Image (cartoon, rainbow, N blue to C red):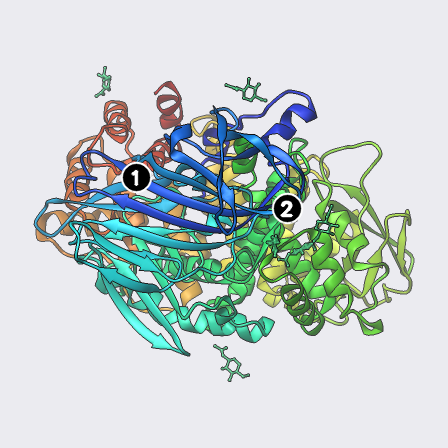
Amino acid sequence: MIAIKIILLLFLLHQSVKSEDNEKAKYRLNGNLIPSKYEIELTVMDNFGSKGQFYGNVKIHFNTTVETSEITLHSDKLKFEPTNIQISFDPPQNSIAVSNVNFNTTLQMVTIKTQAPLSLNNSYVLSVNNYEGILDLDMSGFYRSSYKNAQGESEWIAVTQFQPSSARRAFPCFDEPQYKAKFDIIMNHPENYHAVSNAEIKSIDGSAKLKKTTFKTSPIMSTYVVAFAVTKFAGMTASINNIKHTIWSSIETIRDSQYALSISPKLLKVMENFTNVPYTISGLTKLDQFSIPDFSAGAMENWGMVTYRETAVLWNPYEYSTQNKERVGTVVAHELSHMLFGNLVTTKWWSSTWLNEGFATFFEYFSLAEIEKDWELDLQFILEEHQPVLISDCLEKAKPLTNPDVFTSGDVSAMFGTTTYSKGGSVIRMMSLFLGEKTFYAGLNAYLEDRKFNYSVPEDLFSKIQEKVDSSNHLPEKLSVIMNSWTEKHGFPMITVKKSDNDLILSQTQFFTNVTPPTKWYIPVTYTTSDEKKFSDLKARIWMLPNEPETIISNGWKSQTNWIILNIGVSAFVRVNYDDTLWTGLQQALKKEHFDGITPINRAQIVDDAMNLARASIITYERAFNVISFLQKDTDYYPWYSAFRTFAYLRRRIDRESPLGKILDKYIQRMTGALYKSVDFSNNRVRHVDMLKKVLTLTWACQLGVSDCVSQSQTLFNNLMSNNKVIDPNLRSVVYCTAVRSTNKNDNWEYLWKKLEGSKMASESVTIISALGCTKNADILRRYLNESIKENGVIRRQDGQSVFKAVISGSPQGVTIGLNF
Ligand SMILES: *[C@@H]1O[C@H](CO)[C@@H](O)[C@H](O)[C@H]1NC(C)=O
Ligand SMILES: *[C@@H]1O[C@H](CO)[C@@H](O)[C@H](O)[C@H]1NC(C)=O
Ligand SMILES: *[C@@H]1O[C@H](CO)[C@@H](O)[C@H](O)[C@H]1NC(C)=O
Ligand SMILES: *[C@@H]1O[C@H](CO)[C@@H](O)[C@H](O)[C@H]1NC(C)=O
Ligand SMILES: *[C@@H]1O[C@H](CO)[C@@H](O)[C@H](O)[C@H]1NC(C)=O
Ligand SMILES: *[C@@H]1O[C@H](CO)[C@@H](O)[C@H](O)[C@H]1NC(C)=O
């Protein structure tokens, strides 16, 4: 699953259970019964749009590991009674009588008691016939949603979102990832609809009132990747490398699926090239992907049937931005890498969700990089994953990547956060760099082969890679010992570098949080000096060890040396601090021509470290601002992206109308002078990353009130309103927001609101929703918030949170209005 990066702090209210561990253990299955196969037949009636229920029959084949007269499995919001249940030996013989059925809605479990015990080491089959479930509107389980067709009429779809804990809302099941099984699925549905599931269609029978679509047997897989959909969508198909790829979307939007369709076969091939394990190991010969109008996550990797929000899969060059294209590319890459990391090999329990999501986040960038070679995704990874998670992971309340404290479905949902995705991906990247590509990928192949169609724990990963490690890797310890120092504790080290004559002395402490006893790490250290200026080799040159108070680079400093940079290419998950002499050396070097050869990503790293060390009161802001003063002459994307994030933090903390706030804004404006001159409002084609830079720069300039930026935006907006002159999709977010912000009249807001009402294109809607929050008019903001929770209003259910986010981030007064609301 790919999460939607919205204010998770506010919305992921973590329902922690504050009781004893044995009480929490009740949320877990007891392992007495091991399922091997499900036969599921679901029926969706003609009127599912108005009624919203479905009916099901399920047969679960399972083995016993103990003698027991209790069958406990998951079931949530499903209705059935003892008379709906049948239990017998497998293959069926006389049935075993049921004495009692007890639903526990807190645990989302049902316990079925039998009159005679089931014997040890035997095979049984449990049937639940004609149970009733709800096709809810809440985007979870087997749910329904609607969209408007070209004629403006509502069309309904029924589709699933099970991860992490909602398969139990569609059929009774052993709903934990380790209980893998095969699935035989049959869908009965109205005849003008089409049904799709994980596996290929075996047959379609149209002879009865409802159409019956029968699917082939699925691969052995976890319940949370089971999926099915009943829609009137159109499909666009390409058969490549013996795999039939189809993207499904509404008839109105299907033409925008071309880009996703073109990269999907290549992405599967890239993953095969990396790991030497093909997609077809699943036994599947097809891959369906769905663009869903109402979708709670960003996308979901169901095996053979991936689902997406429209904005994560649809794109065309005329109406969507460069950023939209990168979003589609990275989300598709993320989901398709899950076919191996997540679906073929699955985390045993959600405690180590990073085994799924960390890898998918890593490949989101590094597999797409093989196709979109000039997008610099290896460097973008650092800006978008590595640097942001350093900010949350240093806090005391941060959780370790491998978190033993996960029991309830609330605990499980909370695992789908920044740590799992971004720190998971960053720590995997660090491991790939210190191992080197050859060992890393040979190890991943061994891991996938060993654990295929089964679950895994972190030790499986480390021990299989260990088999491929040799003396050329120069590891100071067993891989698992090294990696556990990163995965089993929260936080990360700050390396402090001191010069002592010709030597450099490194020491480590935990950044920002103090824990006792102090956490220490095995740190792979990369560096270069002004003598070498060698920024390309990201393999560790030395290791810092937990039991060494100091690590010495002897004779690392020559008489002619001016500076040293540690952690080049942001290779390790650390921050770096220097002594005064070394900071001053760096500060002076960055002021030289061409920044004395220090590359853009290393400048980004210095900005991010210096400003965050100041934030933590480790160095002074005076020092930090001196270090980053080179930005005045810098027009590169990477250092500025990092700088803007640190400036955004300061602007959130300082009242913008106060004297200090005004000084800060003036300062940022002055610093961005050269940067602003390097971009323009034209729709000239530029390099991918330069387009990202342009949008970022204009967004900041207009927000700071740079008059040229504001007036150019207003001109473009007026031309749109009065002459219908189309604005370059890349510029729309800046122009719309500026137009709404820079006037007290409501015309611009009302114009965009109308446009939103008529919008058929998800990405345009997202842009407008965000811009509407830029107004300073309090009445309009309150009305806007009201609209976000209206049933059948202009704002789709999936976008309600985005309205809230737009309001609280659009202006300082929006925060109060949002919180009051
Ligand atoms: C459900 O299980 C919890 C935890 O064991 C228990 O406290 C609660 O009483 C149960 N509820 C019902 C209705 O059995
Ligand atoms: C149950 O089956 C397992 C695996 O087949 C076997 O190791 C175990 O000895 C069996 N137990 C009994 C009591 O038969
Ligand atoms: C279940 O038990 C039967 C023997 O009763 C055995 O043949 C089969 O392999 C077992 N299946 C699983 C998944 O353990
Ligand atoms: C996969 O590897 C083969 C052989 O090295 C190469 O020819 C092909 O271009 C690669 N495919 C992709 C999509 O990277
Ligand atoms: C899955 O892995 C476990 C633990 O290694 C092993 O006991 C089990 O037999 C495996 N299951 C299958 C179906 O291979
Ligand atoms: C928002 O909705 C509430 C409750 O329906 C209503 O009292 C209030 O007047 C509305 N505010 C605006 C600005 O529309």
Graded by Cα atoms within 10 Å as few (under 14), some (14 to 19) or many (20 or more), the crowding at tag 1 reads many
Q: Is mark 2 within 8 Å of ligand 5?
A: no
Answer yes or no: is residue 499 visible: yes
Graded by Cα atoms within 10 Å as few (under 14), some (14 to 19) or many (20 or more), the crowding at tag 2 reads many
Q: Is 78 situated left or right of 482 in this image?
A: left
Give percent across and percent down for residue 337: 51, 62
Q: Quadrant of the C terminus?
A: top left
Residue pointed to by mark 2: 352
Q: Is mark 1 within 8 Å of ligand 1?
A: no
Instruction: State how far apart marks 1 and 2 are (Cα).
Output: 35 Å
Q: Given the image, on which type of amino acid does mark 2 rest?
A: Ser
Give percent across and percent down for residue 399: 65, 37
Q: Is 299 situated left or right of 480 in this image?
A: left
Residue positioned most to the front: 94
Residue at point 45% right, 31% down?
11
Residue at point 76% right, 60% down?
463
Answer yes or no: is residue 578 visible: no
Q: Is residue 549 positioned above or below 374 on the image?
A: above
Q: Quadrant of residue 243?
A: bottom left
- Give 317 or 595, whichever is nearer the viewer: 317
Give percent across and percent down for residue 98: 49, 30
Residue pointed to by mark 1: 55
**Tag 2 or tag 1, which sits nearer the N-term?**
1
Which structural element holds mark 2? helix
- Give 485 or 107, whichever is nearer the viewer: 107
Q: Is residue 128 positioned above or below 592 on the image?
A: above
- Give 200 or 811, whichever is nearer the viewer: 200
Residue at point 31% right, 66% down?
246
Ligand 6's image quarter is: top left
